[in-house]
Image (spheres, rainbow, N blue to C red):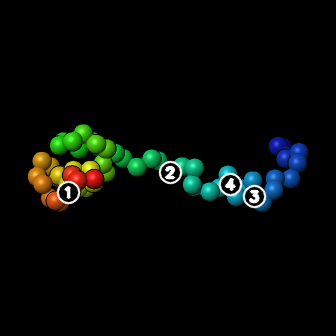
């Protein structure tokens, strides 16, 4: 029968049981207008376009 040689601390045990390390990185897609990375199904924060249509008016005088 397998018996642990040393005591596993509460912190080590809880780190192993946590699900934080199982999370995936958020999905990213490229904007069809400017090519910048954006979240899928969202308006591009760089140019203000969504599916080739200007949704937000962006200032280019930055």
| Residue annotated with mark 4 | 15
Crowding at mark 4 (Cα within 10 Å: few <14, some 14-19, many 20+) = few
Mark identifier at residue 58:
1
SS of the residue under disc 1:
loop
Reading the image, the residue beneath label 2 is 23
Instruction: Residue lying at the far right in this picture: please name it.
Output: 5
Q: Which mark is residue 22?
A: none
Q: Quote the CA–CA distance across marks 2 and 4.
A: 14 Å
Residue that appears at 57% across and 55% down = 19
Whole-angstrom CA distance, mark 1 to mark 2, is 33 Å
Query: Which residue lies most toward the top here?
Result: 35
Q: Earlier in the sequence, mark 2 or mark 3?
A: 3
Regarding mark 4 in the picture, which secondary structure is present there?
helix
Q: Position of residue 48 (x, y in %)?
A: 20, 54
Cβ–Cβ under 8 Å for marks 1 and 3: no
Choose mark 1 or mark 2, whichever is in front: 1
Q: Where in the figure is residue 55, as x and y percent of width and height?
A: 14, 59
Viewer-nearest residue: 21 or 2: 21
Q: Tell how many labels.
A: 4
Q: CA distance from mark 1 to mark 4?
A: 44 Å
Question: Does residue 44 appear in the picture of this structure?
Answer: no
């Amino acid at each position: 029968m397998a018996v642990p040689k040393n005591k596993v601390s509460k912190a080590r045990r809880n780190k192993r049981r946590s699900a934080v390390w199982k999370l995936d990185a958020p999905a990213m897609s490229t904007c069809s207008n400017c090519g910048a990375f954006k979240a899928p199904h969202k308006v591009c924060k760089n140019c203000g376009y969504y599916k080739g249509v200007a949704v937000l008016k962006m200032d280019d005088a930055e």
